């Protein structure tokens, strides 16, 4: 038995007929538009990943700065 992928469920929910055509091996009449949409999603995914990495780096930098400030203030209070 072939596993059902989430993309297949999404395709079925969006359009039962398109899902059926794909199961039967029919080729879409607009492959250029589909390829352009796939490329658009790929670029968006990369940008979203980069934004997440930058956000994590920003939080790490903020926490490091706070730790350095706390150590500096502690040194001023003690010394």
Image (cartoon, rainbow, N blue to C red):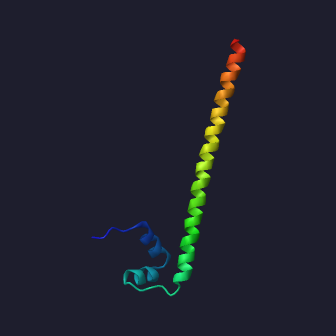
Front residue (pair 5, 38): 38
Residue appearing at x 38%, y 84% in the figure: 25
Q: Is residue 4 above or below residue 34?
A: above
Residue appearing at x 58%, y 65% in the figure: 43
Q: Is residue 70 above or below residue 33?
A: above
Task: Locate residue 9 relative to residue 79 in the image: left or right.
Answer: left
- Occupied quadrant, residue 74: top right
Give the image location of residue 20, x and y in percent. Answer: 40, 82
Residue appearing at x 56%, y 74% in the figure: 37
Front residue (pair 3, 27): 27
Q: Is residue 44 above or below residue 18?
A: above
The image quadrant where one finds the C terminus is top right
- Occupied quadrant, residue 33: bottom right
Task: Locate residue 25 relative to residue 36 in the image: left or right.
Answer: left
Give the image location of residue 63, x and y in percent. Answer: 63, 35
Residue appearing at x 72%, y 17% in the figure: 76
């Amino acid at each position: 038995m072939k596993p059902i992928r989430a993309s297949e469920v999404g395709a079925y929910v969006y359009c039962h007929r398109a899902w059926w055509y794909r199961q039967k091996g029919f080729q879409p009449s607009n492959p250029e538009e589909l390829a352009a949409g796939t490329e658009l999603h790929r670029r968006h995914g990369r940008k979203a990943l980069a934004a997440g990495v930058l956000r994590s780096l920003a939080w790490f930098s903020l926490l490091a700065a706070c730790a350095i400030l706390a150590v500096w203030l502690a040194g001023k209070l003690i010394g």
